[in-house]
Image (cartoon, rainbow, N blue to C red):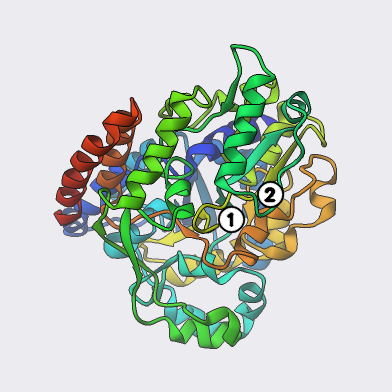
Amino acid sequence: MTDSHVTRRTLLRYGAYGAGAAALAGTAASWDRLTGADIPGRDDGSLVVATLGPAYGPEAIRTLTEGFKKVHPDIKLRINAVQATDWSDFFAKILTQIAAGTAPDLVYVATEGVQLFAQRLGVALDKWVKRDAAELREYFADVHPSLVESMMYEGSLYQLPVEFNAADMYLNDQVLKRAAAGFPAADWTRDDFTELLRDMKKSSGSQFTPYFWTNRLWGGVVPWLFANGTNLLAESKAPGGAWLWDGFYPSAERQGRGGGFRWTTPQATDARVEESYDYLASLIQEDLCTRPEGGNGQNLIGVFSTGRVGVTPAGGFWAGGLHLAGMEPGSFDVQYFPRWRTQRMQFGAAGYALLRTSKMQDEAWEFIKFAARRDTLMRLFETNQTTPARRSMLTADRYREIGPRHWQVFYDTLDKFPDTGPIPAPPQVAEVEQVLLKHTGTALSSRRSVGPALRRMQRDLEKAMERDV
């Protein structure tokens, strides 16, 4: 990828797993109407893959098209890098293509859209995975089962994860030194975190913010809910999935796995949810962080790299972003999210979803396999603009030139904390996210606002979850 596209991608990636999915909901809601019309064939007979334009620059597209041609010279491939400002805009444009009868065969989809696509638009990959089991054993052995499970819905697999990002904690070394604070231990607690923010505040000027976070589904309030042993929606596992777990994972790794996550009853008024919000409101009251902003945090790399922010939650994508912003190895580092009642953490992942409208489903499956190959991802993710789904790609050589020192944290968030799970993203994710963002801002205006705001959030979440997407 060219640097100009990587920079933009890095900034977008910060909000990729918390981006609004309203347009995607519109796509799904229109499914019956859309499939009632005849979908005309493509002019040149190409397999068409739609990606978010800023995330796939010319070099990335060339990597995929030329590499795929070598493996499958008989399949014409066209990658449409849809120019869009964010994921919501991207999905709106995909809807337009479907309505116009020019739907792509494959769409790159992040965690928010997995269940919505699976329910309304996608094709389960089960039959191909079973058929090509011998070929895929190497892939599954290299990919954590939590990532795979996050791409399942009601017992079936809908995507092969190629990347993910967990919400770990980045720390600015300059700020740590200024506060005479050491690097936190892996098992640091919420109270350790609070004390560190206080030390940073005492040693810095009035323009400094110890902790900064943005108001969104990924990396917003949700990591604190996970750490406190709760969630926005009641979480369980769908039955099924044994065909995959028994076929590809040893017993220790498949224990407790199911057919995908289910997020059902809203629980915004749960005591631990209120406790989590009250804690964040106390940080704001103590001037240890600001009220969370909306958006994807595009300005955050600048303020962090210049030492005006001390700590922020981000994933492996930020390693490349901070390097491009001029931060040298050793000027920043990363640690696990602090422990509260638990040290369960959250992640978002992404992969290619196959649309039901595709007339080239077998060819599309061949691209899905190609895109998940290690050699493909090695070329695609050279600049550390994300965390590869393949464990073997995270090596000292990959991070030697850019940092951070504790790069192992990125994949160990899964390996050492096997209960780490995906952000809550049911098929009604668009409305759920809108409700969360709206009431989180109100709840954190003061500590007295927390209870009333969460009660309103509960009512709105109940309405959202009752709606059929």
Camera-nearest residue between 88 and 322? 322
> Residue at the spot x=64%, y=66% of the render?
415
What residue lies at 14% left-to-right and 49% top-to-bottom? Answer: 463
User: Mark 2 touching mark 1, by CB under 8 A?
Assistant: yes
Residue at 39% from the left image edge and 58% from the top image edge: 114
In the image: residue 297, left or right of residue 225: right
Q: CA distance from mark 2 to mark 1?
A: 9 Å
Q: Position of residue 128 (x, y in %)?
A: 48, 79
Residue 392: where, in percent of width, then height? Answer: 74, 65
Name the residue that disc number 1 marks.
Answer: 163
Residue at 56%, 51% in the rendered image: 166
Instruction: Let me know if residue 308 appears in the view.
Output: no
Q: Which mark is residue 381?
A: 2
- Horizontally, residue 197 falls left or right of residue 400, namely left
Q: Amino acid at mark 2?
A: Phe
Quadrant of the drawing holding the C terminus: bottom left
